[in-house]
Amino acid sequence: MASMIGNIVKNSTDITDEVILTSMLSSLKAISTAYFTATMAGTTPELKSMLSSAMAQVMSSHSTLTELAIKHGWEKPYSSPAEQLANVYKYSITEKQ
């Protein structure tokens, strides 16, 4: 049963390395927000230190994945805002078809 569901999902979803990386970046952003909030709400210095350390690791992972995305050309942070918007629009049009 599990493999049948897996095949259905696999056949209806085009998962590429870019999609996986983008998903991981989004998850890391959410995790860092949660760690930051927990760090600020922490009641003891030890807890704040532990959470801050974990948040630093998440930020390091995010930086590494961002560098990978830039290296593969999936992210173009130095393009003009208009060019970035045009690329996103073009990508959304081609993904719908």
Image: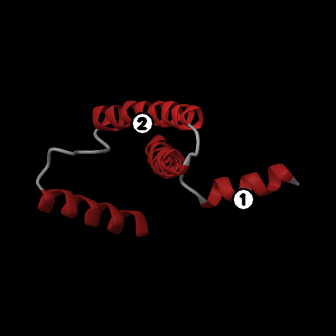
**96 to the left or right of 12:** left
Rendered location of residue 3, percent (x, y): 81, 49
Give the quarter of the image for residue 74: top left
Q: Sequence order check: which comes first, mark 1 or mark 2?
A: 1
The residue singled out by tag 2 in the image is 59
Disc 1 marks which amino acid? Ile
* Percent coordinates x, y for residue 84 in the rendering: 20, 57
**SS of the residue at dot 2?**
helix
Pick the front one: 6 or 65 = 65
The answer to whether residue 81 is left or right of residue 59 is: left
Residue, disc 1: 8
Estimate the x, y position of residue 79 in percent, counting from the top left. 14, 49
Quadrant in which the N terminus is drawn = bottom right
- Residue 97 as seen in the image, left or right of residue 5: left
Where disc 1 sits, the SS reads helix
**Please, what is the three-letter code of the amino acid marked with disc 2?**
Met
Looking at the image, which residue is at 21% across and 45% down?
Answer: 77
Q: Is residue 97 visible?
A: no
Q: Residue furthest right?
A: 1
Q: How many marks?
A: 2
| Quadrant in the picture for the C terminus | bottom left
> What's the CA distance linking mark 1 and mark 2?
35 Å
